[in-house]
Image (cartoon, rainbow, N blue to C red):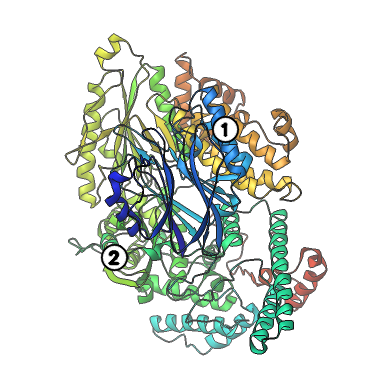
Amino acid sequence: MEHNIIQWNCRSFIGKLNEFRFLINAHKCDVFAICETWLSDEIENLPFPDFNIIRRDRPTLGGGVLLGIKKDHSFSRIHTPPQEIIECVAVKAKLGNLNVSLASIYIPPRAKTAEMIAKVNIDLSNLITVLPSPVLILGDFNSHGYVWGGQFDDALAPTISSFCLNQGLEILNSGEATRVARTCASALDLSLCSASLAHRSRWRVLPHPFGSDHLPIEIKILKNVCTVADQPINYDLTRHIDWGRFVENFSSSISFVSESRPLLEEYQAIVSCITASALEAQTRAVDQRRACSKPPTPWWDKECQEAFNAKMEAFLLFRITNSAALYDQYKVLEKKCKNFLKAKKKSFWRKFVQNLPPTTALHTLWNMEKRMRFGIQPNESEHFSFDWIELFAQKVCPPFAPNRQFSQVLSGDHELDAPFTMTELSLALLSSKNSAPGRDQIRNKLLQNLPAPSRARLLRLFNDMLEHNIVPPEWREVKVIAILKPGKPPAQHDSYRPISMLSCLRKLLEKMILFRLDNWLESKGLLSNTQFGFRKGKGTNDCLALLVSEIELARSRKEMLASVFLDIKGAFDSVSINILCQKLQDAGLGPKLNNFLFNLMAEKIMFFEAGSRNETRTSFYGLPQGSCLSPLLYNFYVNDIDTCLATSCTIRQLADDGVISVPSKNIADLQSPLQTTLDNLSEWARLLGIEFAPEKSQVVIFSFFNKTENNIQRGVYDPKIDLHLYGRRITIAKDFKYLGVWLDSRLRWKKHINHLLLKCSKRLHFLRRITGFSWGAHPSDLIALYKTTIRSVMEYGSFCFFWAPKSLMIKLERIQYRSLRIALGAMKSTHTMSLEVMAGVMPVRLRFEQLALRYLTRASSTNPLVLSNLQAIAESRVNSKLTPLFRDFESLRVYPSILPATSSNVLPDSYSDFLTVDASLREEIKEIPDNFRTAIIPGIFREKYGQIPPFNCFYSDGS
């Protein structure tokens, strides 16, 4: 439930009456704020009978602002002081239980001189003085600013930013463009509000301009209510459980399950015993019909409930008796309850922020802030149609019949086919997180607390499944959760990413298989050296460092580098299990394990749920996104992609994202090998059953030649090439966002650093919200929060851009200065270097250089090609920003380690195969306060383990 507000620069209100009627009816508008109405005094009445119109017209042509308030809401007009530059109209409205000051303003585009900007500042300051808090200021500010999504800061932007900062106003804009012209888009329309409204507001730009060059903006102010989504229930059997009772109940019930039963019957009986024992061991009743709604606010406790009940009882008693004395008593209790709840909420928030642990995640803080403001958020998706679920299911599970069966080998002997050991099971349990369960509701924590004899029995079941190639039918049942991709429209099926919820017992066996298969594929060299996704010691930094070093190497040789960025459509969903297992068999994988993988992956019964819509489909294609085996199997599936490369071409892969590059001094030598490679990739993908997405593929030509007549004639300045994929021309771009880093054709890094500024500015707002003049989080916690939520954003990919021009790097340094001032409570005039010394934080540029040297130290063993590129750049004697970094690295005298790598998946021989892990003590002591732990825990340990013979050893992490 919410109040809907429409904000729009319509550019002629009368000329767009029909469009505007449709707009307010389609979005069930309560309030609309319009600027550039172009109305005059001659037009007296506007045809909107359901709304009260308050407006101010410009005496001359153009301009004009108005507010429309639905007649369901009361309001009073606020008479604003005379303004010299801005045009404004304001009201104080009551939207339900919310009193808010609304203002519609317009700043003409001519306000760019120093004199005009000073007048704008005065006008805004005078306006805010007459607006009671909370306020919502909507309008066209005609200003470009990085903070609200502009490409640059114009002369007016600092004034607007300072005004918001000084008045405690938040900018609701998400960075989307609000004005669309023929050649560019910009964010000129701003929505400013008080901090108390910021977390209750949902801001979005509507997709159609309705005849204007400005896009309408929809703002939803959520009411302070709680809603419970009508979704299937996933109850957690481990949340309130007595682990001692669970072990006792399970040991008793499993003793009645005969080991002579058929394999599947025994497995199903064990699963039933786990579930029944967990239910019997619950310390609270489990409602399996409906999930319990969360409390409306985290600060509400027993005292709050008692105060509220006392007030309500007094009111009911007054209604029964109609006694004036009882009414006075009720009013006293009402005022007392109001003040008490207000103080309780304030006290809870202050205690919360003052006791923040350094490891607190940013989303946890945001969620707490929103719950403090207005309770649980309603589910945005319930306002949309769920018709997309059918197309989504068809996309994930397309109609398919296997056209080539995998020929299973029934005999053979292989080291990977050996029975699993207790060590492997224990390692798999230790490394398993308490992730979401499948349809059987059994979580990993239940499996981790099974007694030792039951683990041995479970291990025997797994080995029997592998030996006889039997997969329980429950393991084929997959619950698919549709996750909305960031920034995508919720009504389209392509906007969602499928996540498979698998049985934790299946995932446990898959993890045991993963340990073996990963070691085997890596040791045999069966994975491509150009694949950096989901592999130990490799990641996005390797891909970025290789690409940037290749660009700089081409620059040092006075060459261009053309890079084609490719994307595979539904990579995991497109894998043919038949082809995959045939490739594994050809590579020499043992027949038992290969046959079991085929049986496990070949058929899936997938359950899709969205609101009240359900779809069930059977799939014979694709790897489930949620299986720990899927990334490794996909890497092996595409391991022969290097065979498609033409001479002089290179490729870098990170899962389904790839980039093909080729250096050359002339255009012809760029186009020919790239087109040959693309043709080879098209045929290679067809044979594997996968497909590239030409609409998402782009080519960027990195060229550093200056704009001269000779270079223009040679085509090396702003070069163009013609490449095609599946007959469709690949777009030539000036920049591309690769693995989260914006790369422009001349490596100037301006766009990427501006992107970081916008991203970090939003996080800075949160730092301000958890600090006050006399209260707030401890400075050490705020500094830790800065490091984890702001500095980490700036550090990602810093190897690529830490040598950017000083004019750009200083912007990132200012982000650090602002953060440290907030954390330390320092004044704006405090010396920046003093801030860093007091906070113990390294300067940004020095920190980036340290990270770059650390990466090179690691890359000397894991990715030596980066060092080879840097060495070639240094030997070319060309002035490159990477040469000093390489010289510094050489001075460290770092040499690759000659010690053999040790797999972490295999325990040393000194460990027993009957390793027992007991995590129940951790659960029992979790609620003990820190100041009592030293006195209480030893007694619990002696009581729990005192009967164990003394010659046994206990191993702990020391915590």
Residue 197 locus on image (x, y percent): 56, 54
Label 2 Cα neighbours within 10 Å, binned few <14 / some 14-19 / many ≥20: few
Determine whether, in the image, residue 572 is placed left or right of residue 756: left
Q: Which residue is mark 2?
A: 387
Q: Is residue 850 visible?
A: no
Determine whether, in the image, residue 34 is placed left or right of residue 730: right
Quarter the C terminus occupies = bottom right
Q: Which residue is mark 1?
A: 121
Numbered disc 1: secondary structure: helix
Q: Is residue 319 above or below residue 364?
A: below
Determine whether, in the image, residue 458 is placed left or right of residue 28: right
Camera-side residue of 163 and 306: 163
Task: Determine the residue positioned at 47% across, 24% down.
Answer: 870
Task: Determine the residue positioned at 47% across, 36% down.
Answer: 755
Residue 439 locus on image (x, y percent): 42, 74
Camera-nearest label, 1 or 2: 1
Q: Quadrant of residue 605?
A: bottom left
Q: Which residue type does callout 2 highlight?
A: Asp
Question: Which of the two discs, 1 and 2, labels the residue nearer the N terminus?
Answer: 1
Residue 538 locus on image (x, y percent): 47, 42
Q: Which residue type does callout 1 highlight?
A: Asn
Label 1 Cα neighbours within 10 Å, binned few <14 / some 14-19 / many ≥20: some
